[in-house]
Every structure is written in C-alpha cells, then in structure tokens.
Amino acid sequence: MEVQSPWGEDVLEDDEEELEDPEVGRLMTSGKAGTYLTKRGITLRVLLKDGLIEAGQGVLSIHYLGKKFMGDLMVDGKIRWQENGQAFNSPSAWATHCKRLVNPAKKSGCGWASVRYKGQKLDQYKTAWLRQHQPHGPAVEVSPLSEGEEDDLLEEEDEEEHRDWKMNTMEQAVVRKQQVTGQRSILPEMQIPLKYSTLGSRDSARDPHTLVEVTTFTAINKFQPFHVAISSNALLLLDFHSHLTRSEVVGYLGGQWDTNSQMLTVLRAFPCRSRLKDAESATATEEEVCQSLFLRGLSLVGWYHSHPMNPAMPSLQDIEAQMDYQLKLQGIENSFQPCLGIICGPYFHGNQGTQSSICPFWVMPPAEHRPNDYGIPIEVEVTYCEDNFLTNDILHEMLRYPQNISDPPPCFTVGMVYLSS
C-alpha cells in the first residue's frame, strides 16, 4: 500500500524513496535567503507546472528485463499504471513496484533514471529545470559522479541484473536438461529423426527424446533474420567437451550481439563441468560462468549440448527448451536478440569420417492458427571463423575439464579406437 503524502509547493517528500545518491546540484531559491533546492526536491508536479512536461495517457514507460510497463501522467503529478489503474506518488514508487514484480530481489533504485517520458529519461527533465532556474545563481555543484556517469552506472546495473536474470533462468533449464538426460542409458539405441510434417499437435504421450529433422529457412520461404559467426576456438572447446563422455554434456555460449548488423558472434564456449543430476554443482558452475562472461565482456548468446551416439538433430524436448531460451534471451526494451542452440554429435556412426556432426539451430514458433503444434526446428547458416592461434585460456580449460569427469563407466579412454578403417 502506497503512503499518500499531501501535495504542497514546499513539500519535498515524494522522492524520499530515491537512492541516497549524492546531490547532483543545488540552487538558491527565490524564497527564504540561504534556502537551497536539491535536484531530489524537483517533483513531477514542479515539471508540470513549469511546462517541461505535459500530462497524458501512456506518456510514461519502464523497460526492465524484457518487460514493458506503461503509465499515464496525471495533472496532479501522480502516475497511473495502465495495467490495473493503481496510482503512485512518484517515479521511484512506480519503478520499484514494477521492478520487484519482475525481480523480487530488486532493491530500491533511481526511479527518475528508470522511467521515461515520451522515450526520454525523466532525469533529463530534472536537469533541464535546474539549468533554466539558475542563470544567475551559484553554479551547479557536480558530484563525484557526473550526470552522464551516473546514468551509465544505472544502465550497467540494469544490464547486470538482466544478465544475472538470463543466466539464472537458463541455468534452471540446463539443470532440468541434465536431470532428464542423466536418466538415459549410457549407450542408447540409435534413433532415426522424424520429419517435422509428421508430428502434428503436441502430444504428452510422445517420447520427448524423439529426434526431429531440421529444415532450412529457404525450404519454408523465409529469410534467416540474423547472421551468425562462430569462433574456431569456441567450436573446438564444445567439441572437445562432447568427446569426453558417453553421456550428454551441456554448456553455455558467450559472445556478442550487434543490433546494427544483426550479427551474432559466438566467441567462447563455457562447459558445465558438473555431473548430470548434480543440481548443487550446476548452480556453482552457473555462478562461475556468469563471472567469466562478465570478466571477458561477453554476453550469454546461447547454449549447446551433445547427442553422443545419435544424429545431431534436436529432440522434441530440445525444441521446447530452445523456444523457452529464445524468449528468455530477448533483450531489454523489447529489442530482438537471438538465442543460438548447437548440438554436437561426436560418436554418431553416420558421421563423415571421425569429424563430429555439428547442428546450429533455431526454432520458429508454429503458425498462429496452429498454436498447439511443435515449434519448427531450423538449421542456422553460420560462418566459421578460424582464430589465428589457440589461446592459453582455451588450452587451460581443455586440461582442466577432464579432471571433472572422473566416473569410469561413461568416460572414453584416450587412444581407444573409434572407427576402424
């Protein structure tokens, strides 16, 4: 329940919910001598009264962790959330409420930097008001963080929360994948993939491990909506990881997404070193991967797993998981970011020679008039970029990972004959 505080020209309580940030500026008011007005004291009502902003429906918005919230600015300076008509006294109150709906662990933040008025941050209107009302007054005192730096830090905070949120949700899904695949036999019978056209609607009685042939964008008269480039070092590490055991392995993909060129670049693989069904170790691995991504300046761009003895084609379970990941990996502010899935088949006897089969794939949602159908698995065209050298980082990981797969039965012995001539 929001506490309603009375409005008044000299009442500055509306933004007491803000972070205890340093005051960005002070202004000598025209009232009592020696009275200073801080930037925090500027309210929506002040900005409305002086004409910097106008009341209206849907003029306020919050974009947070892929969610969008719309609000109306009332003539009395209050905010009405369009979702349920709830009124809030200040941007901070509204922003905190909305963010906690998405991320319950979210602490209070700067609502003025989170809320946008007609696409522009409200904090910019505060600054503009200060500059208009101090032409002959004392200069605005600059805090240790300049206005731009403060905004950058707030954006970095939201980006970090978004990264942690994506990692957490994908980690939960990877753990589920590990729990299911860990129940399979070490040497399953080779499966023959089904054509997508034979699947029909979702059927809970169907084996979720049923493999499905991938199609192409050309075959369904579509253009691939993004480009993909994969580093040879990333491919080497995920292939090496897949070769270590007869059981399925799972890992993350780190890289970069360029919205201008619509290019997704996979630069690094991050194998999950935990044993299957080991949820505690999986959580620790997720935290380690999250930190590794941050230190390398990379983003989470996808995932990979292996089908040791079967074709590198997605199962029904993989299709459902991939659709889920694609939704979770969408960028903030409704911007599109693809999620790439890769399947590696290291020991499938249908492979050409001793080379693993690799299947980068993406899932297109079913047609609107057939919402109960499975998603359509599509093979993604990629460019494989050969790195100039094998980095020490990759070599170190290749030496370290075999030590974490210590159970004798599922492991392959180095030097064991795989294919005889």
Image (spheres, helix red, strand yellow):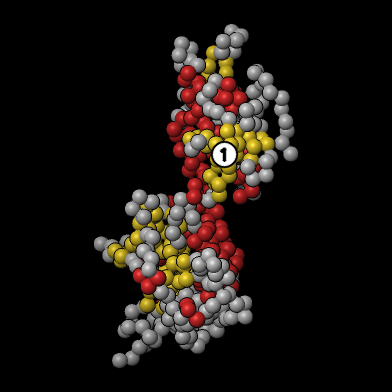
Q: Residue at x 68, y 41 (%)?
A: 85
- The residue at 33%/79% (across/down) is 355
* Residue type beneath disc 1: Gly
The percent coordinates of residue 186 (x first, y second) are 52, 83
Residue 403: where, in percent of width, then height? 46, 71
Residue identifier under label 1:
58
**Residue 273: x, y in percent?**
49, 68
Q: Is residue 16 left or right of residue 218?
A: right
Q: Is residue 168 visible?
A: yes
Disc 1: CA contacts within 10 A as few (<14), some (14-19) or many (>=20): some
Q: Is residue 296 visible?
A: no
Tell me the quarter of the image containing the C terminus.
bottom left
Viewer-proximal residue among 349 and 123: 123
The local secondary structure at tag 1 comes to strand
Image quarter (top left, top right, bottom left or bottom right) of the N terminus: top right
Most extreme residue toward the front is: 369
Q: Is residue 86 left or right of residue 419?
A: right
View extreme (bottom): residue: 421
Q: Which of these two is toward me, 60 or 324?
A: 60
- Most extreme residue toward the left is 388
Residue sitting at x 61%, y 9%:
32
Query: Horizontal and vertical percent for residue 94?
Result: 63, 38
* Residue drawn at (45%, 57%) of the image: 300
* Vertical order, 71 against 273 (above or below): above
**Which residue extends farthest top?**
33
